[in-house]
Image (cartoon, grey):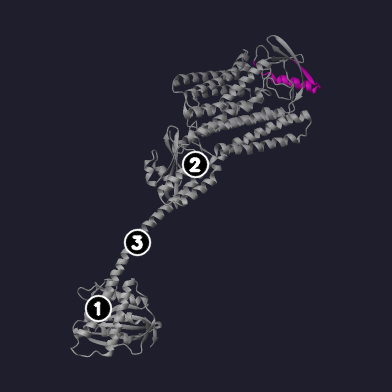
Amino acid sequence: MDPPTSRRARDRRAARLWPCAIALVLVAAVAVAAGRLSLATLGTPFPGLFLDPHGSYSSVRFPRWPAADSLRFPDRLVLVDGIPAGTPRDMPNDFVLPGIRRAIAGRYERGAGDVELVFSRGGEQIPVRRAIRTVGVDEVAFFFGFYVLVGLSILGSGVVVYVIAERRAAARAYAVWAAGAALFFCTFYDYHTTTALVPLFDVAALAVLLGFLWLAWAFPAPPRGGRGALRSALVASSAVGAAIAGVLIASPRLPVDLLALRIAVGHLNVLAMFVLVAALGVRVRASTGVEREQLRSAAYGLVTIPVLIGVSLSLALVAGRAAVHLLLPLLAPLIPLAIGYSIIRYDILYTRALLTRRLMALPLGLAGLAAGVLAWLILRYAATVHGMDWLVPVVFGLSAVILVVIFGQRLVTRLFFRAAEEYRPTIEQLSEHIASLREEDAIRAELSRLILRWLPTEGVDVLAPGALATVAGLTAAGHASLDAGRHVRVAAGPGRVEILVPMRFHGELCGVFRIGPKFGGALFTSEDVALLDTMAALGAVALHHAAVIGEVENLRRVQVDASRDERTRVVDTLSAEIAHELGHPLRYFKDLFQERPAGAPISNEELDFARLQVERMDRMLATLETLEIPPPRQEPVVLRRTVEHALLLLRETFQAQSVNVENDVPEGLVLQAEHDPLVQVFANLLRNAAQAAGPGGSVGVRAYRAGDAWQVDIWDNGPGISEEVEPTLFRVWGVTTRRGGKGLGLMVCTRILRHLHWDIDFLREGDRTIFRITIPVHSTAAS
């Protein structure tokens, strides 16, 4: 069977609304008409007892009326103060009650306080003298107001069951019974007073009878064996019932007395009740497990009515008094209550509805109103007997309404909305438990465990989005609904439906709750769904955070690996850079100690410079040990002297290639920088220039003011740098000017100058290749 949330199910339910709307309109019209007729009877005289439309004594009696112990149904009234009141022999089924009431009203208007009524029973006449009373608010409030209230509540339950139940045979049978019962209660008072709606009362009595029979066959589902034969018998019975209804409607014009038929219809109603009891008993006896619990939940209420009515009728036969009419509006609601309870607890008719507090508000309100009317009537009777103030019944009636609604809400919460009582602690437990969890599997297991603590379901699974393919019956539309954050119901077998609750975080589906049917097939409530939504939201956050933490852990591992690789790269780069830079002082030492003529003295200036280079080499090795290049110190540096030191380091290179060197740096130019790094910059750039110029070439350094900055050009007259190399000129390992070189010199220069916030650029002017360093004016100490 399709879940009721599918499009087909929604379309079916929409189609069922039309007959329900028609039934509601018709019954409401009957209730309005009956209400107007009942109000017209207020203040009219009557003899303190009810007669049926044909003049027969009715056992219907209000507690304040004097008892008529000598009378029994169907004793027929024949004389009113000696005047014939019976039915003519040629029309034995005529409605004589209006004429009888007019005769009594005439006696009352002439000042008579009582009237003598003579009834006939099997040829015997039974005289009864009755005080003439007037119809009061109490009679109308009970026999019309209270009855109509009960009838409309029963009709409402029939409409709900007819629309939402997927066990259609039982739904139709109950709808027929509910419509008949509602019509019966709405026309009950009119049947005993104005007789304007008697045909509808007769139809209602037969509809109730047939409703009981169809319920015996169809509730909660038709029997497996002999289904066709039983259904054919019921169809034939329905046809006979329709024919009887037609006969009763036409009875005022028929010459045959139909009293026996009317009595038979009443007895058949009682018999139909016991047929329903027997059918339920057979089903309960043949069932086991959950099915037996479902049937028992409905059987208690369905069995109570016929049993109590049977007891009342037995007492009426023995004692001559009947209280059925007083018990009827109290007992009849037990049938919808029993069916409603079995639907809520076990979903016995496969409604798959969502139970909400608003859905329970109407029956609670009607129950409160009925209790208020009943309390008011009882206190009205007590007030009349004991002389109490009229305000007391009103206060007690209102109090009854309030108490029934309040305690009814508590009872409904305890029976059907258990999740509401455990809502807050469950959320606190959820937050507490999942806060310390980091693994997605652990979070899913904890969510399942917490849901099972308060939701009596057959099972809970927390599915990953990729596992939805394993859910049988989940369509593409269902997938789209989950992605959009809507619940989805899927069929899990005959009469079984699972709920899928999406877990979304920032619009992304993190997982899905797969909630199995509640134990016994009970309906899910709005509190269940609200709590599932809340837990899904918190669970989605937890799963998202777990995923983020997992990604962070993976990233951390990647970063550790990358850091290890970066550290290795730094070591390699620093080693290569220091090895590159150590070449300058080492070549100087080679020139100082090996290349000079034997016996040539070493000047003090050369020794001082050599000592400076040793200290510089020591600082380079310290940098390699710490793997950290210290930031440059800002101190006054004479630029020309720095360039001279760089030229001194490259003396052997220039001499070996006969390179001509020019130093055009002004004597007084002092910069805020650090001496050693600047020596590295100029040594690298001049060495590159010498290699580019080649043997016999020229290189030089010149410094000059250019607007708001100083510019230092390191130039050579070599062939220049090719266009292919220019884009990678200042990158690590970017370009080299000699075979086997790694391009470390320019990398070192770029790093040092960037730390000083100086710029370096490359250009070609005429036959010169120039590396131009731009120095802001604020970096100069003097000019």
Density class for disc 2 (Cα within 10 Å; few <14, some 14-19, many ≥20) is few
Density class for disc 3 (Cα within 10 Å; few <14, some 14-19, many ≥20) is few
Q: Amino acid at mark 2?
A: Arg
Residue 740 appears left or right of 388: left
The tally of labels here is: 3
Q: Which mark is residue 560?
A: 3
Q: Residue at x 23, y 81 (%)?
A: 587
Q: Residue at x 72, y 35 (%)?
A: 394
Nearer to the camera, 765 or 41: 765
Callout 3: helix, strand or loop? Answer: helix
Q: CA distance from mark 2 to mark 3?
A: 43 Å
Residue 283 appears left or right of 58: left
Please give the residue where the numbered disc 1 appears in the rendered image.
583
Q: Which callout, 2 or 3, points at the residue further toward the start of the chain?
A: 2
Residue 105 included in the magenta stretch of the image: yes
Callout 2: helix, strand or loop? Answer: helix
Nearer to the camera, 281 or 674: 674
- Above or below — where is 378 with respect to 609? above
Residue 18 visible: no
Q: Residue furthest right?
A: 111
Q: CA distance from mark 1 to mark 3?
A: 34 Å
Quadrant, the N terminus = top left
Q: Residue furthest front?
A: 599
In this picture, which residue range is highlighted in magenta?
93-117
Please give the residue where the numbered disc 2 appears in the rendered image.
453
Density class for disc 1 (Cα within 10 Å; few <14, some 14-19, many ≥20) is few
- Above or below — where is 218 with respect to 416? above
